[in-house]
Image: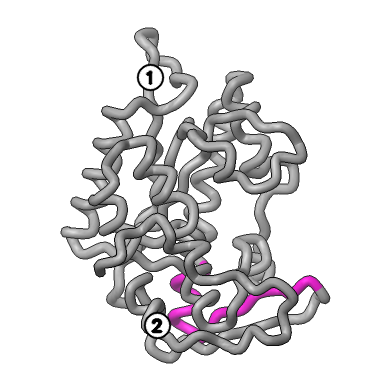
Amino acid sequence: MNRKYLAFDIETAKILPEDFGELLAHRPLGICCAATWASQEDAPQLFYSQQPDGTPAAQMNQQDLSAFVDFLLDQAQNGYSILTLNGLGFDFDVLAEESTRWDDCRYLARTHVDILFHIFCEKGFGVGLNAAAKAMGLSKPENVDGSVAPQLWKDGDYQRVLDYVAQDCRLTLDIAETSEKNKAFQWITRKGTTGYVDIPSGWQSVEEAMTKPLPDTSWMDKPWPRSKFTAWLDSSL
């Protein structure tokens, strides 16, 4: 496979109640850590701020987050396709706010590959990471998810959170590369069946996916508009 991917993911820092509803409604969320995993690499790169004694800080500071944005820009310049699952609707939006690098994050968001957004533009609904992983015989850990990661980080269980965010990157990378190789994306539906979408030309960037015609969502009670993911972007491409 000639295309090189760099999967990335963040974990937020704010501790929320169990019934927090829409996560972005509670911003600013802060970022406790981030990870990337590149094609053909055996290990992730991990990012977090440190206190003077070298232990992880409660959340990443603006300087370190800005350096992380520079890292993503450099990797894109070096030929990597930045890869996420819902990075357009969440990760890049939060990263832009926390780093104050709005223009650069908007550029990265438009030009990167977001698996969820590609499928959303094709089908009118999104597919979660675990549903896609299960179609490959994989799964996320049952005892950790993004909702509990902030509390774990606050409690000092840093390695557990770092392992979790790294695994999400690895799963995203495996899903993207396997789907591209098979020219089809698969997931396990809520009914337990296997859904699929053909991707004969591979994954599309966000700005490419946005050119797709709107899918038929007349069968849905409350279909999501594309603006759910794109509202924070500038109107220009």
Residue visible at 58% across and 43% down in the picture: 25
Choose between 120 and 184: the one closer to the eye.
Answer: 120
Membership of 179 in magenta stretch: yes
Residue 12 horizontal/vertical position (percent): 52, 37
Which numbered marker is on residue 202?
A: 2
The local crowd at label 2, few if under 14, some if 14 to 19, many if 20 or more residues have their Cα within 10 Å, is some
Answer yes or no: is residue 153 visible. yes
In the image, residue 212 sits, relative to residue 165, either above or below, namely: below
Answer yes or no: is residue 40 visible. no
Q: In the picture provided, is 172 more to the left or to the right than 218? A: left
Residue visible at 47% across and 43% down in the picture: 10
In the image, residue 183 sits, relative to residue 225, either above or below, namely: below
Q: Hey, what amino acid is under mark 1?
A: Gln
The part of the chain drawn in magenta is 175-190
Residue visible at 45% across and 82% down in the picture: 181
Residue 137 horizontal/vertical position (percent): 68, 68
Choose between 231 and 6: the one closer to the eye.
Answer: 231
Which numbered marker is on residue 50?
A: 1
In the image, residue 35 sits, relative to residue 4, either above or below, namely: above
Disc 2 versus disc 1: distance between alpha carbons?
A: 39 Å
